[in-house]
Image: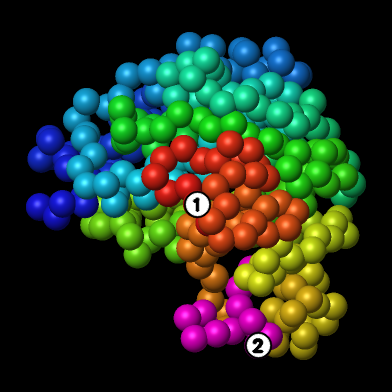
């Protein structure tokens, strides 16, 4: 067995089995969506009551090899950020104590949290539904990662949700699309560290987050929501304005999708392919919001005290 692979103590276990185990401890979609029909903190409290996602790790799994553990913990930090972000904007409340790594007392402080956000603009009800469903996915991604990592999983770090800007109905979609785009490139970049079933697992999460990113980019375009690129790999959502321009692919201005175009293709990312960010590039964005953090930085931006785990420095 490779030293950096997740060891499945039950030989019949598989990624599918792990997903079923975690799914049994995660939230039912219908119950989740019904709870989101409430308002504010009442929704958050009611939705999460009785859902002790992370208090008892899955006993059939242990993590061996620091490379795999560190990589999955890095992804776990990103899920803490996105799940917390979507929890506040859709319910006006934090995720449950059990989802932060045992208890809220073990969690880092949350600052810059908004009240419940009510989307405005074109198709506002569809936007609300979309954000609610993204939260459903992010919550279950978090629950699943915690279950797999068990006692090797890190606690939620301190998070500043207003690192880019105070979250409002006017900018929430722009912030959401940046977080999703960065997360997608993070999974893409860390895939070369993961082995065997871990790669399959990460690609399932990557697929879901790619769906989120694409939908958010289109909504941003339809609502004329603009945003500046956070680094050289960022492709802001832009309608090229004509079928001919769209057929030519992304430009330096942006595009429908966050893929490489003629202006941004390079030796590792050809035109039409998604970018990958190394862990350092991901942290440079998240620590440096709204500007990039420099090499050696270990905290700042969305993570004022840094991320938890061994992969924590730009």
Residue 262: image tag: 2
Report x, y in % for residue 6: 22, 45
**Residue at 73% from the left image edge and 24% from the top image edge:** 92
Q: In which quarter of the image is residue 291?
A: bottom right
Relative to 112, is 182 above or below? below
Q: What stretch is highlighted in magenta?
A: 256-270
**Residue at 80% from the left image edge and 60% from the top image edge:** 227
**Residue at 46% from the left image edge and 37% from the top image edge:** 308
Is 262 inside the magenta-drawn segment? yes
Question: How many numbered discs sit on the rendered protein?
Answer: 2
Q: Name the residue under label 1.
A: 313
Q: Earlier in the sequence, mark 1 or mark 2?
A: 2
**In this rendering, position of residue 21 left or right of residue 244:** left
Label 1 packing within 10 angstroms: few (<14), some (14-19), many (20+)? some
Residue 172: image tag: none
Relative to 171, is 291 above or below? below
Q: What element carries label 2?
A: loop
The residue nearer to you, when weighing 125 against 165, is: 165
Query: Disc 1 and disc 2: Cα gap in Å?
Result: 31 Å
The residue nearer to you, when weighing 63 against 255, is: 63
Our reading of the magenta stretch's main secondary structure is loop
Label 2 packing within 10 angstroms: few (<14), some (14-19), many (20+)? some
């Amino acid at each position: 067995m490779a030293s950096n692979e997740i060891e499945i103590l039950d030989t019949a276990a598989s990624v599918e089995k792990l997903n079923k185990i975690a799914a049994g401890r995660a939230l039912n979609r219908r119950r989740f969506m019904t709870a989101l029909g409430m308002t504010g903190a009442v929704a958050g409290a009611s939705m999460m009551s009785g859902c002790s996602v992370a208090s008892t790790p899955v006993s059939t799994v242990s993590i061996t090899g620091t490379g795999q553990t560190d990589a999955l913990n890095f992804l776990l930090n990103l899920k803490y950020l996105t799940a917390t972000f979507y929890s506040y904007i859709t319910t006006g409340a934090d995720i449950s104590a059990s989802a932060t790594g045992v208890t809220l007392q073990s969690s880092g402080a949350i600052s810059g949290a908004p009240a419940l956000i009510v989307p405005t603009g074109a198709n506002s009800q569809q936007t609300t539904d979309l954000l609610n469903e993204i939260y459903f996915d992010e919550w279950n991604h978090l629950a699943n990662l915690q279950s797999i990592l068990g006692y090797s999983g890190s606690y939620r770090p301190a998070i500043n949700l207003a690192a880019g800007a105070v979250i409002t109905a006017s900018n929430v979609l722009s912030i959401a699309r940046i977080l999703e785009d960065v997360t997608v490139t993070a999974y893409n970049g860390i895939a070369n560290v993961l082995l065997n079933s871990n790669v399959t697992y990460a690609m399932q999460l990557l697929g879901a987050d790619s769906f989120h990113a694409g939908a958010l980019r289109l909504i941003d375009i339809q609502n004329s929501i603009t945003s500046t690129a956070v680094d050289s790999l960022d492709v802001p959502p832009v309608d090229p304005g004509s079928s001919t321009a769209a057929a030519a692919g992304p430009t330096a201005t942006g595009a429908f999708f966050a893929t490489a175009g003629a202006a941004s293709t390079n030796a590792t990312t050809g035109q039409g392919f998604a970018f990958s960010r190394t862990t350092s590039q991901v942290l440079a964005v998240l620590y440096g919001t709204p500007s990039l953090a420099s090499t050696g930085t270990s905290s700042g931006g969305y993570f004022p005290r840094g991320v938890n785990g061994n992969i924590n420095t730009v």
